[in-house]
Image (cartoon, rainbow, N blue to C red):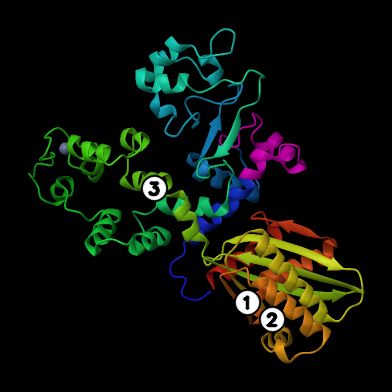
Amino acid sequence: MGGLGFRDLRLFNVALLGRQVWHLIQCKDTLCYKVLNAKYFSDGNIFFPKSMDKPSFSWQSIAQAAKLLSEGFEWTVGNGNSIRIWQDNWGFEGLSGDSICINKSLVKEVFVRYLLNESQDGWDKDRVSAIYGDFLGEKICNIPILHDGLEDRCSWFHNPHGVFYLKSAYSWLILKEIGLGPHRIFWRIIWRLKTLPKICIFCWRLGHNILPTYEKISSFRSGFNDTCPRCGKEKETLIHTLKDCPMAHKVLEFGGLDNKLLDGNYLRRVDWIEGAVRILDIKALSDFITGTIKINFDTSVHDKKAYYSLVARDADGFVLGEQTGYVNKDVHIELVELQAMEESIKFARSKNWKNVDLESDCASLVNRFNRRQEDLTMLGHRLGEIKKQSNIFSQFIFCWALRSCNEAADALCNWARTKNCCMVFNVDYPSYIHAIVLNDAIN
Ligand SMILES: [Zn+2]
C-alpha cells in the first residue's frame, strides 16, 4: 500500500467505531444493544448517553465516536417522540437547535411531537413559524407526517440512501478537518479538473484559507478595515466573498446553483465546498473514489475441509466487501486457491467493478495463470475459463503478493475456520479483523 500519503489514523478509527454506532442505531434487538442501552442510554438515544463514573472502555470509545459523528446523522420524522428539537439534527440538512430563532426561554417544546397539531397528522403551522421564522417554518411544514405512528428514524446524511458507510464517514470527517490538513480525495479532484491551472490553484488556496480577504489582512494588520469593499455591509470573509455577498450571490444564481447551496447557512467555507461537491457531482465523486479495486484471497485446509476467504479493498484500503466459504472435502490446496480465485471474480462482477487487481500469496497459481496457454491439465483449462470471465473488466491483473500483504484475507480465513461458516460481508466485516485492516491500510 505504498505511496498512500497522509492518512489520519485517528479519524479512520472514529469512522470504524462509527459502524458500531450505526449498528446500535439500526439493530435494537441485539443483546449488545440491550446491554448498552440499559446501562448507558436508557432513553434510547445513543447521542445523549448518561454520564457514568466508570464506563467500560469499549463504551467510552463508541460514545466518543457517536459524539464526533453526531452532526453527520439526521432524524427522519416519524411520530416525533424521539427527536429533541434542541439537540438533534432532523428533517433536513441544517435544521437543529441552532435554527430556533426566538428566545430560548420562550420555547417550552422539547420533542418534535410538540410541534404537531392536536390530531398529530400535520404541523402546528403557527407555532412552527413562531419558533423557526417564516422561511424555515415553511420548509418544516412541508416535511410529510406519516400517519401510522412510525418511530423516528436516524439516518446518515452523507449517503443518498441514508446508510452509514465507513468510507463516507471517513471522507466527511477529513473534510471537516480540512483546515488542518489537506484532504486527498478532494485535492485529487481539484487537480484533475480539466480547466485552467489558475482555477485549480485558486481552489487550492481557497481550501487552505490563504486568500487575502480583508478579514484575513485585518487579522495581522491593525487598523485595517475588514468590511467587504463591494457591498460594504459585512466582513469580507471567504464565505462572504464566495457566496453571501450580493454580487457573488447573483453570479452563482445565474450559474444555476442549487438553492440549498445558495441560501444554506454555512459557517465554514469547507462545509460549503463539501456541500457543493456532494450536490453537483455525487456520481463523479463516487466513480473517482472507486478506481481500481484490489482483491486478496487466501485459503487454508483443516480437518478435511478447505476454507477460503477474499477481501476487496479500494485504492485507499477501505474494505468494500468480503466473503468466506469452505469446501467439504479433502482437495489439493491449488484447487482451493482456484475456487477462491473464481469466487473473487464472481464477487467483482456482482459489484460491477471495472478495474480489478487480484492478489494471492500462492505463487504456483499465479505462475500457472500467466502460462496457462501451455497448460493442458484440468487446472490450466479452468484458468483459461477464468481468463475469459475476466474479460468483462476494463483492467484485470493477477499477481503474487507477500504473505504479509495478505493478512486480512488470512485472518478472515482463520475466522471462517473457527466459525465454520460461509459469509458475505459488505463494509461490515467482523470486528475481529479491524486491527489487521487498519494495519494493512497504513502500511
Ligand atoms: Zn460583500
- Nearer to me, 267 or 312: 312
Give, as a three-letter code, the residue at label 2: Asp
Q: Which residue in the protein does label 3 denote?
A: 274
Disc 1 crowd rating (10 Å Cα; few below 14, some 14-19, many 20+) is some
x and y percent of residue 262 in the render? Answer: 31, 36
State which tag comes first along the sequence, 2 or 3: 3
Bounds of the magenta segment = 22-49
Q: Which residue in the protein does label 1 denote?
A: 405
- Nearer to me, 125 or 223: 125
Residue at image x 24%, y 64%? 197
Which disc number belongs to residue 361? Answer: 2
Residue at image x 47%, y 14%? 108
x and y percent of residue 316 in the render? Answer: 52, 65
- Proximity of marks 3 and 1: CB atoms separated by less than 8 Å: no
Say whether residue 209 is left or right of residue 106: left
x and y percent of residue 358 in the render? Answer: 64, 74
Quadrant hosting ligand 1: top left
State which tag comes first along the sequence, 1 or 2: 2
x and y percent of residue 202 in the render? Answer: 24, 57
Q: Disc 1 versus disc 2: distance between alpha carbons?
A: 8 Å
Give, as a three-letter code, the residue at label 3: Glu
